[in-house]
Each structure stands twice: as structure tokens, then as C-alpha cells.
Image (cartoon, rainbow, N blue to C red):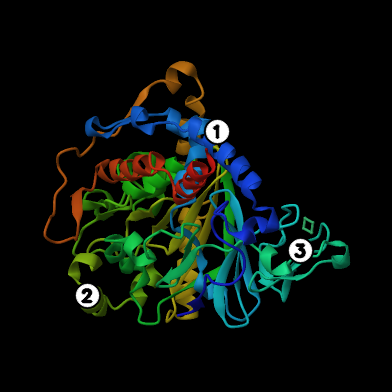
Amino acid sequence: MLQHDTDGAGPAAPGRGDPAQGGPATTSTAARREARRLARALESTVDISAHLDLDHGLVDRTILSDRAIYRQELRRVFAPSWLFLAHESQFKKPGDFFTTYMGEDPVIVSMGRDRRLRAFLNACRHRGMRVCRADAGATKAFTCSYHGWSYGLAGELVNVPNGEDYPAHFDRQEWGLTQVAQLDTYKGLVFATWNPEAPPLVEALGGMTWYMDAMLDRDPEGTEALGGVHKWVLEGNWKLAAEQFASDWYHVNISHASALMVMSPSGKGPKAEIVQTPGRQYTDPLGHGAGFPTHPKSRFDDRVVHGHYDYEALRDRLGDARVEGPMTTGHATVFPNFSYLPVNGSIRVWHPKGPDRMEVWAWTIVDRSMPQEVRDAQRLYNLRTFGPTGIFEQDDGENWSECQATAHGFMAGSMALNYQMGMGLQAEDGVHPGTTGHLYSDGAARGFYARWRDLMNTPAWHEKDQAKAHEKDTP
Ligand code: FES
Ligand SMILES: [Fe+2]
């Protein structure tokens, strides 16, 4: 496993009174200005309770389209949560980097000379320009193309053109790139958070790890990402995709009917083992969710991938419940915006791009021990089904865009949405850890929105810090 680090360059929390954030300008005047900004931000905070009645399975669809709610999500859901960044196999040697987003914040993930992974805000401390404009690559430094400030792999400011024209109190050490508060990996997946108070990653994943391991832990050597990242834009709120991947098997037989026909040997209808088996849906109190059919003959759809696996060995490694359930066909979301499909190794992030738009970034992962022909088969199967032009993916995108489009009308936008399926049917089933319900259920979507509501109604760490500064500053 790679080492990772959160020490070093700039601070993680905006306006925390750390001199590195504002340098000598962090005076009581600056603190007062920051407190006033905070007060304005808090005034516009929406009490989200009015928009969700989860006891009755009702959701107000303004949560998908309202800009004030969206802004609040960025500061109270995305900023404090652990967010997926990359797969650690993308970083092989010092200097390797990958650029992505945490919420709408651009970030660089890079491997330092010490082989530690770090993540930084991809915004120059001078005027805010992105200091890295490439998607991925290898470098010795990140040099801003505006005025030339240059940052080392640990985020430190190493060069400032015309440095002699800055005043004596200008200290380069205080102007490094802003670094995430915590970065950690779980079985190859790299996550980070801006929140210094967030629980450790493994705690934040909670009971979901048992389900994630059905994809990540089939092979003692772990997984690896193949090729690059597919990226595409959808007109739809990010939550539509995240909640569906947490909980929605319901749409499969209808939305994907034509795709299932294509995949059926007779060409006449969906494969019975896909649509008629019973299944379970896992609901996590931390907002994660996973659904999967359960069948003793659960297997990978692709013949080459299916042929590669020794199912008895997998049963020894993962247990019958995982092999017959979440290991193959199914869907899952790690709150808030990371989802995956174990059957084809598709892992994806739903990057928010305003209330009405998301950008999908999707990787294919394979077991490290897979021979080349099996890797190729998994990659091609993923592309055929869930690539940007995949026969399933296109159905899903169309649904989300349609649901978003109708939210703009006044009448349609005022209509409550129904999340009542499976209410009262969730329990511990003695086979799958945690709370599960029937495969066809909105249970995990209700869990996703309960977690989202709680975060939306709770001041994040940066608001608490700033509120304290405000109290201190107010006579
Ligand atoms: S904005 Fe980066 S050097 Fe000026
Ligand atoms: Fe789907």
C-alpha cells in the first residue's frame, strides 16, 4: 500500500485563523471581515427538514434544482465528507499526478519524492489560477501559467518570479498549496477530506466495507485501474445518480429492457437469473447503499471473466453470502458521490457541476492477478454496458436528464417524489451484515437522504471555527 500524508504545505480549513492561510493579513480586521461573511452565509442557510419527510417516504424535488441548496451542499456535504479521488495504481513513481475535483473544488493528487500521496487544492495562492492544467502526468513541480509561482510535489512554494519586489514579511513557507486535512486509502481506493475532524476513513466507510470487499478483495494482490478515465457530462443533479446506484434495482427490468434483450441468448427477453431472483438491498446509517440479486449460481456475465474465476476459492475467501450476492451483478454508492458496479469493475464519481448538471468520471478496475485477455474482456464488457455509450449507461443518463428537466416547471417542480417502496420491510436478515431489505426498495435512497439531510442541517467544522472567531470578535 502507498504511503500518504497530510502534513506539509498549506492548511486545510478556510479561515481557521492559521497564519498560513492569510499570512500577516490575518489580523482582527480580517477575522471580523471573515465573521461577517460567515454571518451572511449562515443567514442564507436552508433548513432542509422542510424538504424531506422520510418517515412518510416523501422528498421535495427542489433539493435537485435549487441553487441555494446546492451551495449549501458544497459546504456542508462535500467539504466535510471523505470523497473518492483516484485509484492508487495511477501513481507509480514520484511526480506522478492526477487532477480531479472534490465537490466543485479542483484538486491535484500527486506522489511526492518520499512516495507519499498528497492532495492539494488546484488553485494558485496568488490569484487562484489552476496551477495544473493537465488531466494526469508526471512532473517535478506545478508552475502557475499566470505569473509563474511554482510549487513542489509536497505543495511548498518553491519559486516566485520577482520575489525581491515582495515585502520583508512575505514568507514563502506560508503560501504553499492548500492541502487536504486527511488522505487515506481503502484497498486501492484513494479518498480525502478537507475536514480535520472527520473520523478515519475506515470508520466513515463503516459497514459498507463488507460489501465493497466483494469487489475489492477477490484477489490477495488487490485491484488496479486500467487505462484512463472516461468523462462525460449529464444534465441532471448528482444525487439522482448517487441515490439510484445506492438503491434502485426497480428500474432495471423496465429502463434496460432492450439492453437485457440484447444480452439474452434468445434475444427475446431478459435473462431470468438477472430479473427473477430474489435479492437484498443494504442500507447504511452513514448514507451508503448497495443492492444485489442473491443466487447460488451468481456469476459474471462476461464469459471470459466468468471462466477466469475459481468460485470455490472465492467462497473460501469471501464467504458464500458475498459470492452469491454482492460479488457480481449489483450496484452501490459510497456516500456521497462514489459508486461502483462489481460485475464489470466500473467505479465512478458523480462530480457536481451546479444543481442541474453532473460530470461522470468512470474507471475500469481489474484484479491485479488477471491475465491480459481477462483484463481486456472486463474492460470491453464494462465499455459495452456502462461506458459513456454503453447500452445500460445511456438508459440511466436519459432518465436522470428527464427527471431534472421536469423539475424546472412550477407545478412539476412543486410535486413531492415518492420514496415509499419497501417501507417497514427492513431488518437484519442474519446473512448480510447491517440492515437490509428486499432488492426492490427505496430503503437505501431513504438512508442516503437521511444522511444528506443531517449533514445539510449541521454546521460543518469550518462554520463552527468561524462562529467561534465571530463570538470572540464581537464586543
Ligand atoms: S495566479 Fe498563479 S502566479 Fe499569479
Ligand atoms: Fe440502470
Give how far across and how far down residue 332 sits, in percent.
35, 54
Give the distance between the C-alpha atoms of the residues marked 1 and 3, in whole angstroms. 31 Å
Secondary structure of the residue carrying numbered label 2: helix
Q: Amino acid at mark 3?
A: Phe
Secondary structure of the residue carrying numbered label 3: loop
On screen, residue 320 versus residue 395, left or right, reads left
Quarter of the image for residue 22 reads bottom right
Closer to us: 410 or 296: 410
Q: Is residue 396 above or below residue 158?
A: above
Closer to us: 382 or 469: 469
Q: Is residue 199 above or below residue 468?
A: below
For residue 170, which numbered disc appears in the image?
3
Q: Amino acid at mark 1?
A: Arg
Q: Which residue is mark 2?
A: 315
Q: Quadrant of the N terminus?
A: bottom left
Q: Are marks 2 and 1 in contact (CB under 8 Å)?
A: no
Q: Is residue 312 above or below residue 418?
A: below
